[in-house]
Image (cartoon, coloured by chain):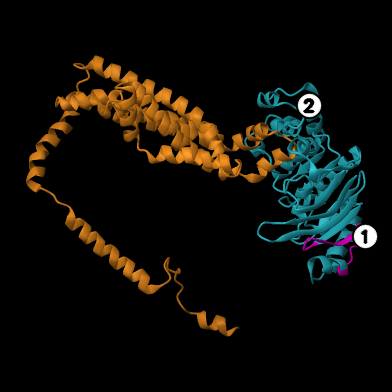
Chain colours: A orange, B cyan
Amino acid sequence: MSSELDSVLGKRWKKPPLIRRTWLRRSLSIGFVIYLILAIATIEVNWLRVYEGLDRGLLFILAFASPDFISRSSDIWTGMVESLVMTVGASVVGIAISIPIGLGAARNIAPLPVYLVCRGIVAISRALQEIIVAILLVAIFGFGPLAGFLTLSFATIGFLSKLLAEDIESMDRVQAEAIRASGSSWLQWINYGVQPQVMPRLIGLSLYRVDINFRESAILGLVGAGGIGATLNTAFDRYEYDTAAAILILIIVIVMSLEYISGMIRAKVQ
Amino acid sequence: MLRLEKLSKTYKTGDQALTAIDLNIPEGQVMALIGPSGAGKSTLIRCINRLVEPTGGHVWLKNRDLTRLSAGGLRRERRRMGMIFQEYALIERLTVMENVLSGRLGYVGFWRSFLRRYPQDDVDSAFRLLDRVGLLEMADKRADELSGGQRQRVGICRALIQDPDLLLVDEPTASLDPKTSRQIMRLICELCAERQLAAIINIHDVALAQMFVQRVVGLRHGNIEFDGPPESLTPKVLTIIYGEEDWERTIQRIGADEAADE
């Protein structure tokens, strides 16, 4: 038996720590605790205000027990239809634009200049928050669902292109190589070597994006970009919590059914 | 038919994978390329169809210099070289038939291939090939439903439907069991004989190579260390290619195996 082996036999074995240096590890833990204490200490809570607000909160929650779908039914209907139209339109347009940009943003299939341009587009789209884009577009196109539709299309591009590009970058290179070796053209190569590999993820992401777009469409109304959000905002402004509750319930039901449908579809395409 | 002239490849990292390889393969010859991992076997066959760009030298296929071709010219020449891969490299999510027909991509236009409306001749020859390798009833199965040996057969069909002059075969048996390995090697060699195809087969299993091929080339550190018939692979030669080991057993077993096969 070697002396090296002798020296370790009978000793306990422990997983090596993530941070090797003991002093660094300790000071990081201590620093974290100090930060946490200081951070909590800076939160200012006006407990009196909270006490008064509890009543209003309760009212809001109670409204869910008696949602009012009737008195504003035509407003709710119009808002919902607008939101759904915005969602579907923006998803279709956004996904259609995302696919070529996603191909361009994948380093393993796009030449460097194309890659940089496409990544730039993705970065801009992701850097600008939906609400900010919506405010800008409302300023340009005026109040209404057109601004919302454009906002959501724009946001879809950033989201989908990036994730599609990342999926392409992690695809099996050899499968694509085999197609190239047969003398295929570039488009054929994409169609046979790349597309089948990324299709399940593309479908999954697209469905997820439809879901997000619908939820966002409910928010965009707050800045005047149309959809159910506008109706919701009005209901809150008028303290009509029962109507607001009805709208929120509808949104929840639609999001849940979208989730259910997308789950079913994703299971099918595996 | 295929002639490599001072073919060399240095990767960007500075690794010299091939150093001035000269090699001549006549029509219809099946050649095994052996050597340790990292010797440059994969690089060598990928430099021939330029999946890896060689950094120096020439590749002549029937008097055409492949290293000087434009993108379009290269695509046309790639049709003449079928390739078979280690992990089969089938498109897992496509059907067996689509995988086989993808070998015709170099011959058909984009819309035909996109809509999967291949010329009847191509469809017929795909069915003929699948029948030849015993997978006719699998045509509409998805590639990932097949076993390893079956997948490699589909890979062979995909290479052959290109109607190539040359097969580039990269470790065809590396992920197969011993029996399937032999069947696949036998199939490749039979098909090459039927169609008068030349082939370069990268292979780890020296004994398996000796059983089936007419010529063995040994590669080490990007240099050809041995070139001769399989019988002249002696322990001494194997030591030069792979390094010190007890090679007697490897070679003896071949003799015994062949006797048992008869």
- Residue at the far bottom in the pictured view: A3
Q: Hey, what amino acid is under mark 1?
A: Glu
Label annotation for residue B231: 1
List the residue tagged with mark 2: B122
Residue B228 colored in magenta in the image: yes
Residue B139 in the figure: left or right of residue A65: right
Q: Earlier in the sequence, mark 2 or mark 1?
A: 2
Task: Judge by depth and name the residue closer to the eye, B37 or B132.
Answer: B37
Which amino acid type is marked by label 2? Asp
Q: Secondary structure at mark 2?
A: helix
What is the magenta range? B220-236
A270 displayed left or right of A146? right
Residue B161: % across, % down: 80, 33
> Where A167 falls versus A188 (above or below)?
below
Indicate whether A3 appears above or below A97.
Answer: below
The residue at the point 80 percent across, 32 percent down is B131
The numbered dot on residue B157 is none
Q: Position of residue A76 (x, y in %)?
A: 26, 19
- Image quadrant in which the C terminus of chain A is located: top right
Q: Which residue is rendered at x = 25% and y = 61% of the image? A: A35
Q: Position of residue B9 (x, y in %)?
A: 75, 55
